[in-house]
Image (tube, helix red, strand yellow):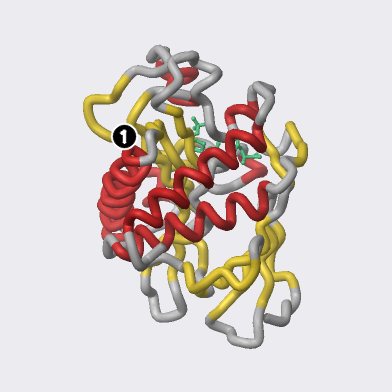
Amino acid sequence: MALGEILYEGKAKIIYKTDDPNQLLAHYKDDATAFNAQKRGTIAGKGQINCAIATHLFQHLEAEGIATHFIDQPQANQMRIRAVQIIPLEVVVRNIAAGSLCQQTGLPLGTRLSQPLVDYYYKDDALGDPLLTPDRIQLLQLATQEQLAQLHNLALAINQALIAFFDLSGITLVDFKLEFGLTADQQLLLADEISPDTCRLWDQAETDPQGRVLDKDRFRQDLGDVENAYTRVLERVLAQSRSHGPSA
Ligand code: TMP
Ligand code: ASP
């Protein structure tokens, strides 16, 4: 598929226009950033690995009745997607305490939450993606109350589907970040990506707190073996998708 002009370049993806105004092309990059791009690097092969993982997860979610922006994967590091206006919220779902939840609440790393926690962050690099409350979301008119309720329910449904999927792969879904967008006709779709860049994934076969990490925390915390960890996630996702049947 011919690439049109660049619509947007983010930290991990370039979004190209296509000759169809309802479709875009997401090019997954090997670039990695953390801490609002204060830390930068490259993870060899990440673009292809994350594109493949996201493809399988979007297909799985579609099969579970979740509407996503995914159309198809024309090349190893390219995904054709439906054009949406991204809602500037990062919707984070947490099952186990890690990362900023531990830093901000003092909960020890690894604390299992009694129910999933849904956190909203303002997708604004200049402000450092601050944590928002539902009232602040209303104040800033980032989403209507009805949309927010929809996002909350979708985030929880996606969490249930992904927990089950990863669990069968021997991986614990600790937390993850979602983004949603609206099509020209106001359909709400799951957008962006789901990959080891945007999830915390722990290997259930490993008890060592560093050895079990299969996600971008290996890059954030300089734990090494980042590419190997991402590859292990892909291998397990592929195996799991195959056993799920035709959507694979
Ligand atoms: P946090 O603990 O740093 O708030 O991150 C929660 C989850 O969201 C974790 O799985 C990593 C993911 N995440 C992103 O995908 N992008 C981001 O910019 C941040 C801060 C977190
Ligand atoms: N993706 C974010 C960034 O660069 C943060 C992160 O994933 O830790 O800035």
Q: Nearer the viewer, residue 244 or 214?
A: 244
Which amino acid type corresponds to the residue marked 1 in the rendered image? Leu
Q: How many marks?
A: 1
The quadrant holding residue 221 is top right
Q: Which of 49 and 190 is in front in this view?
A: 49
Residue at image x 51%, y 68%?
Answer: 85
Quarter of the image with the N terminus in it: bottom right
Horizontal placement of 65 versus 121: left or right? left
Quarter of the image with the C terminus in it: bottom left
Residue 151, compared with residue 85, is above or below; it is above
Residue furthest to the left in view is: 114
**Ligand 2 found in image quarter:** top right
Q: Mark 1 points at which residue?
A: 117
**Neighbour class for label 1 at 10 Å: few (<14), some, many (≥20)?**
some
Residue 65, compared with residue 1, is above or below; it is above
Residue 233, compared with residue 241, is above or below; it is above
Kindly state the secondary structure of the residue where label 1 is placed: strand
Residue at image x 71%, y 59%?
Answer: 9
Residue 78 locus on image (x, y percent): 64, 65
The quadrant holding residue 163 is top left
Residue at image x 32%, y 41%?
Answer: 168
Q: Can residue 129 be seen in this view?
A: no
Q: Nearer the viewer, residue 139 or 48?
A: 48
Residue 171, compared with residue 210, is above or below; it is below
Q: Can residue 140 be seen in this view?
A: yes
